[in-house]
Image (tube, grey):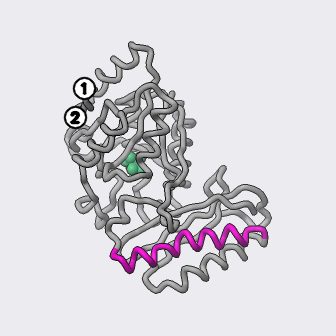
Amino acid sequence: VPIAVAASVARIRADVAAEREQGRRVALVPTMGALHEGHLALVSRALEIADAAVVSIFVNPLQFGAGEDLEAYPRTPDEDLAMLEAMGVRSVFMPPVSELYPHGDIETRISAGEAGAVFEGAARPGHFDGMLTVVAKLFNTVQPQVALFGQKDAQQLFLVRRMVRDLDIPVAIESVPIVRQDDGLALSSRNRYLSPGERRSALALPHALDAVAASASEGAEAALAAGREIVAGEPLVDLDYLAIVDPATFRAVGTGFRGQALAVVAAKVGGTRLIDNQAVVL
Ligand code: PAF
């Protein structure tokens, strides 16, 4: 079956309704395109747990701030569609901006609240409101039974789960582990911005997380100090934050915290902002 590319809300709704009438369970994989192995891991999990996978490709202007890389964000639709077709995806939702935002901007927004204003949200004001708003629109458009998100965007995943719970959206959220290159760098569409030197320096992010995990039994302060030392040795890496958060709240853990936590890191490498995270046990 050739891949069907829907550009309109009406078209994707009709395509998904046809799948549902056959009694098929539909999974949505929301993406901004420029697909890499990390996205493909989401797609292959979607094909495992559902009967039909819809992949959306939409670079959402609402989640980019002024001065961010909206215009420069990589767009590779032909390669994306070829990869998805090769994986057996039959349905792609690739609307133009005018389809999801026909009146230009929209005034109604989902608020990500306090947990959306820290870490990535502090560095990128409005980013998570814009992200949640488009994810809600995609859920309403496609109406999937399950939607898949990568663990690389840990704060995004946390906020999407909380939105679904808070707003009673009838969709199950499934997460998929980070896909890394052999040397440990987490895959990201933005890695293609890195020069060879920056690419080497970017390894400070996974290395810092490894150092945090290795010292976690000594407590959060000592673990974070070990991680910061790694980053400090890399002049091309400008650290934004390295923190350990409670996965239940996405707040930095207090001194007495024990148990499963998440080390999160963000840094600019050259002009490129990268994020990564790793589970740690305190
Ligand atoms: O993670 C992404 O690629 C985007 O934030 C998402 C979930 C597709 C919403 O635009």
Secondary structure that dominates the magenta span: helix
For disc 1, the marked residue is 11
State the residue position of label 2. 7
- Which amino acid is tagged 1? Arg
> Dot 1, how many residues are within 10 Å of its Cα: few (below 14), some (14-19), or many (20+)?
some
The answer to whether one can see residue 103 in this image is: no
Asked if the residues shown at circle 1 and circle 2 are in contact, with their CB atoms under 8 angstroms apart, the answer is yes
Residue 259 x/y as whole percent: 76, 57
Of 162 and 2, the residue lying toward us: 2
Q: Which residues are magenta?
A: 195-217
**Camera-nearest residue between 236 and 89:** 89
Residue 170 image position (x, y, % from top left) = 51, 27
Residue at screen point 49% across, 55% down: 179
Q: Amino acid at mark 2?
A: Ala
Q: Which quadrant: the N terminus?
A: top left
The reply to whether residue 6 is in sight is yes
Left or right side of 75 for 201: right
Callout 2: few (<14), some (14-19), or many (20+) C-alpha neighbours within 10 Å?
some
- Is 145 one of the magenta-colored residues? no
Q: Quadrant of the C terminus?
A: bottom right
